[in-house]
Amino acid sequence: MNIFKNNNKLLILLSLLLFPLTSIAETGHEIMDLTQSGVGYAAIAIFILAYALVMAEEFTHLRKSKPVIIAAGVIWAMIGVVYMNHGMSELAEHAVRHNLLEYAELMLFLLVAMTYINAMDERQVFDALRAWLIKKGFGFRKLFWLTGFLAFFISPIADNLTTALLMCAVVLSVGGTNTRFVSLACVNIVIGANAGGAFSPFGDITTLMVWQKGVVDFWAFFDLFIPSLVNFVVPGLMMHFAIPDEQPDANDEQVFMKRGAKRVLALFLLTIITAVSYHNFLGLPPVIGMLTGLGYLQLFGYYLKKTPHKCREIANHNQEHEEQMGDPVPFDIFSKIARAEWDTLLFFYGVVLCVGGLGFLGYLGMASELMYNQWGATSANIAVGVLSAIVDNIPVMFAVLTMNPDMSLGQWLLVTLTAGVGGSLLSIGSAAGVALMGQARGQYTFFSHLKWMPAIAIGYMASIAVHMWLNSHLF
């Protein structure tokens, strides 16, 4: 801050050279339209460059949060310089604080959810499920549908990324070197995880954003259940007969959940109930309920630490479980918080601030006029889904929420659906797809997914048609 003040004259000169006053429509204490100014063009260029680096993460190995964080800082610095020169710094400050508050609510909400997921992972909940599935010795076709449906039904509670990784681990353990099965099963898992996340506020960051914004009620999301199911089943049926009709070798691996695993699951469900109750009955932000739920887990972690003798008692009575019990003082809540997907959380910060900055410059108003007033809400919302297959659905949905077009509940549900499932069209269109390309490297690839894009597109359009038919009273 002191550096900024000491170089005030230099910054003013720089702003006059880069962003001529003739290109700025000064409107007193109203927000200025800078879409036709140098600062606007520069902001667009910076955002495009940053997002190009995000999309190239698989090849550059540069974490996706880094370019967008820098882009956010540069965009708001340019906005700050222009507004300071016009004696309107408080407007820019108010706008960036508003964006920061929106991010803080979502970040803390996601942080609690990730902490619970990490706690369940440490208690070996997911490993036990994986071992059980493998031990059953299902055929490839049964496993194709089982992992897909589990991805569909687990992702509304856990996030779609964690769910996809869990199901992919099962597929890799059973499928082995059968590339054909692994590839098709991974495509199915990505579709199932994304579709399942679309009908729950907890299934995807975009649905969480819509719920916290208050444009869709918690229970209204479940109107998307059947359309989401159609989105998953239609391409699955088309892929079914391409699955090898073979029986893999059964595996006798046994994994036992650690002490307290079931209670952590119960506390997670209680946390979700608390968050919903705070929002629906008290009119408070859901994040308050989630943070209260984090307190539940902290207290339970304290109980586990204070009762290590129970671990020894279980191990003494069940010698075969001894290895699964782990350290007698194993639970540290802060280690679970540290294992959260911080790159994702910081990427989300960069996206919110970048898109918020572009909106403050006036670009989202232009986009809203073109898409929602000229194209119409239905066409615009379908386009949002297609766009989310190329660009991550987080900035796309945040842009729509920032535009805040005047739409019916049916249209808000439509854009929630399309933004959630549209990412399945390409393997790079969702976090689940990108993660599985790394986990099943060489077997599930961009082109193996692209081969089935026509089938996925048919499911995409079918889900939209079913939604507009079943929920026609909401439009």
Image: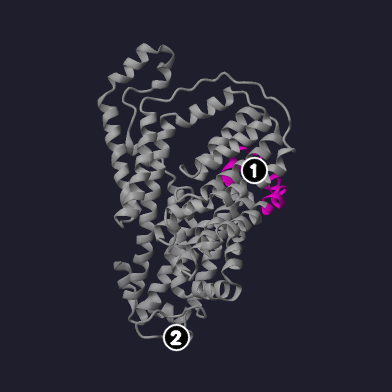
Q: Is residue 460 left or right of residue 281?
A: right
Residue 34 screen position, x and y as percent: 47, 79
Q: Which numbered marker is on residue 337?
A: none
Q: Position of residue 209 (x, y in %)?
A: 44, 57
- Say which of 293 and 376 sits in front: 376
Look at the image and tell me whether residue 302 can be seen: yes
Report x, y in % for residue 307.
26, 24
| Quarter holding residue 136 | top right
**Between residues 21 and 123, which one lies in front from this camera angle?**
123
Check disc 2 and give the amino acid type.
Ala
Vertical position of residue 81 compared to residue 351: above or below: below
Residue type at mark 1 is: Val
- Residue 443, relative to residue 63: is it above or below? above
Residue 328 on the magenta span: no
Name which quarter of the figure residue 179 lies in: top right
Quick check: is 455 in the magenta stretch?
A: yes
Q: CA distance from mark 1 to mark 2?
A: 50 Å
Residue 43: percent from left, percent from top: 50, 70
> Which residue reaches farthest left?
306
Using the image, tell me which numbered label, if any, was put on residue 25: 2
Q: Is residue 156 above or below residue 76?
A: above
Residue at the image position 42 percent from the left and 47 percent from the top: 342
Q: Which mark is residue 187?
A: 1
Residue 388 seen by the camera: no
Which residue, as the protein is rendered here, is positioned at the far front?
Answer: 473
**Count of numbered labels shown in the rendering:** 2
Q: Which stretch appears magenta?
A: 432-458
Q: Secondary structure at mark 2?
A: loop
Mark 1 falls on what kind of element? Answer: helix
Q: Earlier in the sequence, mark 1 or mark 2?
A: 2
